[in-house]
Image (tube, rainbow, N blue to C red):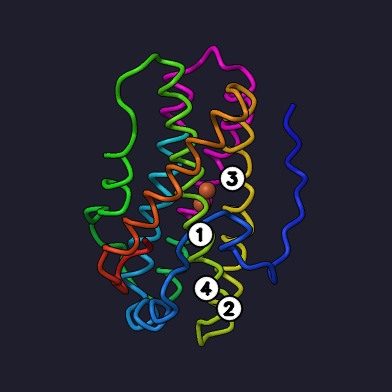
Amino acid sequence: MISLNYAFDKNVQPKSMLGLKLPTDPRWVNLAEKDLEEILTDHAYCEQKAATSCISLIQQYPERTEMVKQVAPIVTEEWGHFRMVLLELEKRNLKLGRQRKDEYVNQLLKFEKKGGSRDERLMEKLLICALIEARSCERFRLLSLNMKEDSMKEFYHRFMVSEAGHYHLFIELAKLYFDDDKVKMRWQEYLIHESSIMENLELRGDRMH
Ligand SMILES: [Fe+2]
Ligand SMILES: [Fe+2]
């Protein structure tokens, strides 16, 4: 059983906490809060995709009992997040738009090793999930600290705490099934690759990543 008790200190810089190599440009918050319908729509689909990825993990690796046990409640949690975003849109009389192309995730997936054994592919999937959670957490933190509206600060604080837990879980699952050094080495490769994606990705207020 993996313990999900972790200390989350909001004053710790996510750059060091999550291992991310490149912090988000703080100007992103100003762009994002200019059009809440846009950022909330993109956010909603990020939550939907997170739930979908967890379901896929369960479908693809049903024999990984501990993972199934740990990831199943995350599906509910992510879908709950989707509903929270929907509610926020509704409260503000805004509409959920169509899903957009997710350039960030598409580029991350290009780095995933597609060959290798089924087990090796599981490690790749767990690390990609961890990475997306880490970056989402970092972005939610920026929103929770810097948005103008207090209710939005609180709204994003809740997501930040939750995604930090998911990041931690995916890393722990990778370590449960695979050699520590192997996980650490591949994680570093992912972090370096992710920072180069972030560096070249256009800073858009209508995208969560
Ligand atoms: Fe979420
Ligand atoms: Fe999450």
Question: What is the spatial separation of the Cα atoms under label 3 and label 1, in whole angstroms?
Answer: 17 Å
Q: Residues within 10 Å of mark 1 (few under 14, many from 20)?
A: some
Q: Residue at coordinates 43% horizontally, 42% vertically from top-left? A: 189
Three-letter amino acid code at the position of disc 4: Leu
Residue, disc 1:
84
Task: Report the disc number at residue 166.
Answer: 3
- Tag on residue 145? 2
Percent of width and height locating residue 78? 51, 46
Residue type marked 2: Leu
Left/right placement of residue 188 relative to residue 165 reads: left
Q: What kind of element bears circle 2? A: helix
The answer to which of 119 and 5 lies nearer the viewer is 119
Give neighbour class at mark 4: few <14, some 14-19, many 20+ (Cα, 10 Å): many
For disc 2, the neighbor class at 10 Å (few under 14, some 14 to 19, many from 20) is some
> Magenta residues, as a range?
55-83
Q: CA separation, marks 1 and 2?
A: 19 Å
Amino acid type, mark 3: His
**Viewport quadrant of the C terminus:** bottom left
Does residue 194 sit above or below 61 in this rendering?
below
Q: Residue at x 40, y 37 (%)?
A: 52
Q: CA distance from mark 4 to mark 1?
A: 19 Å
* Mark 1 vs 2, N-terminal side: 1
Q: Earlier in the sequence, mark 3 or mark 4?
A: 4
User: Which residue, given by chain and number where applicable, does mark 4 sit on?
Assistant: 142
Mark 4 and mark 2 residues within 8 Å of each other at the beta carbon: yes
Nearer the camera: disc 1 or disc 2: 2
Q: Main secondary structure of the magenta part?
A: helix
Query: Is 26 drawn above or below residue 207 in the view shown?
Result: below
